[in-house]
Every structure is written in structure tokens, then in C-alpha cells.
């Protein structure tokens, strides 16, 4: 439960139809297996105590009495354990028979939730045996104890209030208005669904999309536990297709006719945080009861996938689709700006690096879509003290391959004169020496754009904005920043995608640009090679993009970000290295907000963005003390 992670499992124990004692023992074995894995919430299938396919045997007192006896034994077995168990069982309440889910923990039944929607169509005939469950909560007698009974209740952990459980049963999910919607509005961050969905061609894919879609709609974790081996095969076959989703993502599943056990961790803090960000989240409905339970927080070993590059899809097809979608967003944003301003063309600095390459590719796409000549794009190389033959050559080759206009403005003399004018010796390699070059380049671009009635296209990316790795009123400034929403790790993949689809000289130069170290080239080259490598100074962009994603998109605390990074980069970076660069990230992120507060317009392309007009509004003088203090404690 540390950091909001709840180890959960959906399982399908083997069973025998109507053999409650056998089913009880199988359930107890499954509980032990889950306990050994550290599972805090275990969800079993619909009517797991008796089997779903008992038919008219549900009218037999022997079966119902056997079910209650098995339920009591299972409840007793949970004594002294904080594991939460959701098990399906038939129960007679106030003269009617209900298809129920019992929520059990530490030797007591916390509550019983009856199924609301009873199917009586197609292969289902539950209406023959069961009544629809009431929403209103009242008490029912089970084994001599009074227990809350009804649909309108959620189960909340006192020690971690973000862990709040709601229960619906099988058909409840498949109807027009599932109860889980009101349960989520009442605070449930996890929905448990004991189910008995039979198998049919194509049904597994539909079931999977239904579960993950509902988890996205409700911003919740969703555990779907389906009946499997042991159910009657007279007319139907059950495959034990267990599914665990979180906010639209499939976290884990046991495929039909597999082992019938799916286990992972659900991040309830992440879900609660997302709901806080969403001001359209509904208020809690009236008439709901909260049942509290105790569960002391303990670390959960993380088995869920933590991608080291959260901005970049792992599969090749997904990456290509994402990159094409983003470049389309960028190009259409630039198209609108060009049309609105009636600019004669576009001007951008081209360095032979990744960012300016992507910006040029976007600009070319925009001009092609507008039906305008690529010659109206003015690419400018501005060599100075740190420019290498490789990057300059790549810039020139790229422009030639794309058919854009290219000019060269050598700024060495003008920067040297400027440094002399302000009393700088021109030898000391300080921040003034570096920034004078960046500001001179921006001045050249702005003046060229003014001269031709054009628009300066910015090249800086989201990662540089986060770290403030840009010269204020230098490369930080443009008339439209097409890369402002694209993190550095994704910039690389976008250029790689464009290279994969290119041919001849364009493909060659794009591949060489991808192979060139990231550098602003503001310090003199050494033996013709780049001497100033960005990642040696501020840290690996893979780490910083990871930090940025979980800090900006999810608002996680520094300790949680560190823990996730340790998991994601296990074997690649040592904890001390991650911690050092994470401290650097927070220092720079807070200190450099003033640059973001006056950043140019640019298109938002993903869920994480830093525009002061939209996604991120932060005082330029906010303190990073709280964040850094937490990391200091973790360093001890």
C-alpha cells in the first residue's frame, strides 16, 4: 500500500457444481496463494461458493445452507489477516433469493452486495431463481450475525482513504447504466466484479474492451473475476477470463482457458489525483453508506509495467502512429498561424541537431499541406565558436534534401564584437560567452523574418522548457514554437520515424543526425568534435522525461517518482544516480519557471504540457524546498 499501490488479484478457483465444501477448500487454497504474493484485495467469481450453473438447485435449502456454512468457514479463515476478499454466494434475505458478493476481512463480513440487474435472455435465465437486489442498505442476518446488505455502499480503508472499494456483479457492467458509475461517484477507486461470463467467439475481446473502457470512464481500477474450470458444460463453457484494468489501461489478465489468476498493483493515489484534477467529476450521490476497514500500509512489490519512456509507445506500429499523429497536430497548428498572420514564409535556425530537424520537418509538412512552395521556408545556419563540421554539414544536406531555401550567417565576428563591447575578454567560457551566441542567433532570425515578412518557427522542446535549458530571450523565444509540447525522448523517435520512411540522401542525413550527441554547441569544439554534451551537464533526458511525466501529469511526490524510476530503470541506472538527477530536475524545474511564464505560443500534443496559458500555471518564485527536503530524507 506504500505510495498508493494496492496489490490485487482476480482469480477463478476450480470448483464442483453444488459442492460447497469442495469449493470452500479451493477458495481457501486460492486465498493462501494470493496471501503469499502479498495480495491485499482478492476477487473471486460470481457464485463461487456454489458454482454459477446450479440451475434450479438454487431452490434447494440444502444448497443454500451449505453455501452459508462455507461462507462462514471462509470468513473465519480470514481472521487475523487484513486481506480483503470478495466472493460470490447465493443468499436468502427477507424471503427472497439474491445473487450476492460478500466482502470479507479479518474474520467478519463487512457487507453483502446483491446483483442489481438479473439477466433472463439468451443463454441466461437467472430471473428464474434470483431477485434484483435493492440499492438501499439495510441489515441482513448471516450465520447469527447482522451484516449490511444492499447496493449503495462502498468500503473504505481508514489508513489509506484513497483505497475505496465498490462492487457490482457481472450483468451490472453490461447494462445501459452500470451501478459502478454511482459507486465511483460515491468514492470507489476500485470496482470489483465477480462474474460468470461464458465464452463465445469474439467475446473475450469485447469483454476486455468493456472492462478497460469502464475503468477509463470512471477513472478507477476494475477487477473482473470470471467463472472457469468446474462449471457445468451442459450448454455453456466458462474460460476464467480474469481482467484487471486501470484508467483505460489493461494491467493484467488471465486469458480464457489459462491459469485463471491475474495479479498486479493498482495505484489508487494516481486515480484519486486524476479525479481531483477533473472539475467535471460528479459530487457524491445521496444515500450511500461507507463501511470502513483497517489495513496497515506496507510496501507492495511492483510487478506492473513501468515503462522507462512513458511518452513513447513501445511497439513499432504504435510509435509510428503516435509520431504521425503528433507531426500532423504540429503542422496544422503552424498552418493556422501562417494563414492568420498572412506571412510570406517561415524562418528557422537549423543546427544539424534533433530539435531543429523536427521543426523543419514540421514546417515542410505545413507548407506542403498549404500547397505552398518549400522555397518559402528560409532555413538559416549560424556557425559560431562551437559549430562542428558534422552538424553544419548535416544541416546543409538536410535543407538540400528537403528542397528549402538555405542561407548562412556566420555570427563569430558579431558575437566577438559584442563581447568586447560589454567588457568580456572573449576567452572566459562562462554563461555570458554561451548566451551571447544564442541571443545573437535569435536576433538574426527575428530580423530576417521582419525583412521578408515571415514568421520565426521555434525549435525548443518540452524537456528543455521543463529544465529551462534555453537562453532567456535567445532560443527560448520565437513567433511559434512547434516543438513546445514534444519531450526530447519523443523528438528522437519522431525523427527516427521520418527517417524510416525516407529514401536516399534524406534518410542518410536523418540517421546521422540521430547519431549525433545532443549539444547546444556553444563551447569551442575539440579536434573538430563536439565538446559540450547536454546530458553530461543536466543528466540523461530519458530520466528527466520520466521525472517530468510523473511530476507534471500525475503530481506524484518525489519519493514515489524515485521509486518508480528505480523500477523502470533497474539495471540501467543506480539509485544514487537517479536520485542525483531527480534533485537536479526539481531545482531546475522550479528555478526556471520564469522562462516558461513568457514562452511563445505552440501546439499542445499530449497530456503533459507547460504553457502558462493552459496546462501549467506556477509562480516564477515558488520554492522547491518541500520537494528537495523529501529527497534529502531519502538520501540519508
Image: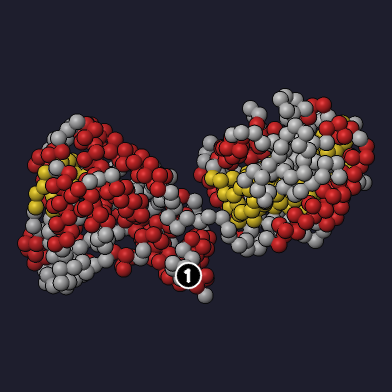
Observer-nearest of 345 and 390: 390
Q: Which residue is mark 1?
A: 575
Q: Position of residue 343 (x, y in %)?
A: 16, 35
Q: Residue at x 40, y 56 (%)?
A: 545
Observer-nearest of 465 and 606: 606
Q: Position of residue 183 (x, y in %)?
A: 67, 38
**In the visual, does 379 lie left or right of 24?**
left
**In the visual, does 339 lie left or right of 579?**
left
Q: Residue at x 77, y 44 (%)?
A: 230
Q: Is residue 490 visible?
A: yes
Q: Position of residue 43 (x, y in %)?
A: 71, 48
Q: Is residue 32 above or below residue 604?
A: below
Give SS at disc 1.
helix
Q: Which quarter of the figure is the N terminus placed in?
A: bottom right
- How is colour applied across the structure in the image? secondary structure
Q: Position of residue 477 (x, y in %)?
A: 23, 50
**In the visual, does 331 lie left or right of 371?**
right
Observer-nearest of 612 and 99: 99
Observer-nearest of 553 and 285: 553
Q: Is residue 6 above or below residue 94?
A: below
**In the visual, does 520 lie left or right of 238?**
left
Amino acid at each position: 500500500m506504500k505510495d498508493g499501490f494496492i496489490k490485487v488479484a482476480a482469480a477463478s478457483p476450480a470448483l464442483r457444481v453444488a459442492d460447497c465444501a469442495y469449493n470452500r477448500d479451493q477458495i481457501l487454497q486460492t486465498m493462501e496463494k494470493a496471501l503469499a504474493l502479498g495480495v491485499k484485495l482478492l476477487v473471486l467469481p460470481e457464485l463461487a461458493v456454489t458454482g454459477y450453473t446450479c440451475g434450479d438447485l438454487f431452490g434447494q435449502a440444502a444448497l443454500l445452507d451449505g453455501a452459508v456454512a462455507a461462507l462462514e468457514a471462509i470468513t473465519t479463515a480470514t481472521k487475523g489477516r487484513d486481506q480483503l476478499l470478495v466472493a460470490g454466494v447465493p443468499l436468502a434475505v427477507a424471503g427472497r433469493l439474491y445473487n450476492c458478493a460478500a466482502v470479507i476481512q479479518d474474520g467478519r463480513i463487512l457487507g453483502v452486495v446483491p446483483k442489481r440487474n438479473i439477466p433472463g435472455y439468451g443463454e441466461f435465465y437467472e430471473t428464474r431463481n434470483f431477485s434484483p437486489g435493492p440499492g438501499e442498505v439495510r441489515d441482513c442476518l448471516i450465520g447469527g450475525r447482522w451484516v449490511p446488505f444492499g447496493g449503495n455502499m462502498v468500503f473504505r480503508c481508514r489508513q489509506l482513504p484513497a483505497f475505496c472499494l465498490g462492487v457490482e456483479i457481472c450483468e451490472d457492467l453490461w447494462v445501459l447504466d452500470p451501478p459502478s458509475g454511482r459507486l465511483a461517484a460515491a468514492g470507489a477507486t476500485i470496482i470489483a466484479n465477480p462474474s460468470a461470463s461464458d465464452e463465445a467467439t469474439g467475446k473475450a475481446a469485447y469483454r476486455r474492451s468493456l472492462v478497460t473502457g469502464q475503468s477509463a470512464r470512471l477513472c478507477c481500477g476494475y477487477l473482473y473475476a470470471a467463472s472457469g474450470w468446474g462449471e457445468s458444460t451442459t450448454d455453456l463453457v466458462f474460460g476464467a477470463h480474469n481482467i484487471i484494468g486501470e484508467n483505460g489501461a489493461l494491467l493484467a489478465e488471465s486469458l480464457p482457458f489459462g491459469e485463471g489468476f491475474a495479479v498486479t498493483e493498482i495505484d489508487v493515489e494516481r486515480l484519486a489525483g486524476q479525479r481531483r484534477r477533473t472539475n467535471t467529476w460528479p459530487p457524491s450521490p445521496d444515500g450511500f453508506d461507507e463501511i470502513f476497514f483497517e489495513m496497515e500500509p506496507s510496501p507492495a512489490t511492483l510487478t506492473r509495467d513501468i515503462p522507462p519512456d512513458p511518452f513513447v509507445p513501445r511497439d513499432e506500429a504504435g510509435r509510428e502512429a503516435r509520431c504521425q499523429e503528433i507531426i500532423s497536430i504540429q503542422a496544422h497548428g503552424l498552418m493556422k498561424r501562417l494563414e492568420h498572420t498572412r506571412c510570406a514564409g517561415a524562418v528557422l535556425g537549423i543546427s544539424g541537431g534533433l530539435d531543429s530537424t523536427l521543426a523543419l520537418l514540421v514546417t515542410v509538412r505545413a507548407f506542403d499541406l498549404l500547397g505552398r512552395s518549400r522555397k518559402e521556408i528560409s532555413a538559416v545556419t549560424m556557425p559560431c565558436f562551437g559549430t562542428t563540421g558534422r552538424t553544419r554539414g548535416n544541416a546543409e544536406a538536410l535543407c538540400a534534401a528537403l528542397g528549402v531555401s538555405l542561407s548562412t550567417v556566420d555570427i563569430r565576428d558579431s558575437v566577438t564584437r559584442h563581447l568586447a563591447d560589454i567588457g568580456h575578454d572573449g576567452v572566459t567560457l562562462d554563461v555570458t560567452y554561451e548566451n551571447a551566441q544564442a541571443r545573437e542567433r535569435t536576433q538574426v532570425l527575428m530580423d530576417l523574418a521582419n525583412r521578408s515578412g515571415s514568421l520565426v518557427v521555434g525549435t525548443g522542446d518540452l524537456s528543455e522548457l521543463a529544465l529551462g535549458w534555453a537562453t532567456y530571450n535567445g532560443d527560448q523565444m520565437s513567433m511559434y514554437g512547434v516543438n513546445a509540447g514534444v519531450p526530447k525522448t519523443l523528438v528522437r523517435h519522431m525523427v527516427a520515424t521520418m527517417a524510416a520512411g525516407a529514401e536516399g540522401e534524406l534518410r542518410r542525413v536523418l540517421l546521422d543526425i540521430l547519431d549525433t550527441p545532443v549539444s547546444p554547441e556553444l563551447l569551442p569544439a575539440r579536434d573538430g568534435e563536439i565538446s559540450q554534451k547536454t546530458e553530461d551537464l543536466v543528466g540523461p533526458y530519458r530520466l528527466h522525461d520520466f521525472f517530468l511525466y510523473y511530476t507534471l501529469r500525475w503530481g506524484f511526490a518525489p519519493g514515489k517518482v524515485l521509486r518508480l524510476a528505480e523500477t523502470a530503470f533497474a539495471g540501467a541506472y543506480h539509485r544514487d544516480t537517479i536520485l542525483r538527477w531527480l534533485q537536479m530536475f526539481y531545482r531546475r524545474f522550479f528555478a526556471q519557471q520564469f522562462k516558461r511564464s513568457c514562452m511563445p505560443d505552440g501546439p499542445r500534443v499530449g497530456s503533459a504540457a507547460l504553457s502558462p496559458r493552459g496546462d501549467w500555471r506556477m509562480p516564477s518564485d515558488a520554492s522547491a524546498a518541500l520537494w528537495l527536503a523529501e529527497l534529502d530524507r531519502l538520501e540519508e
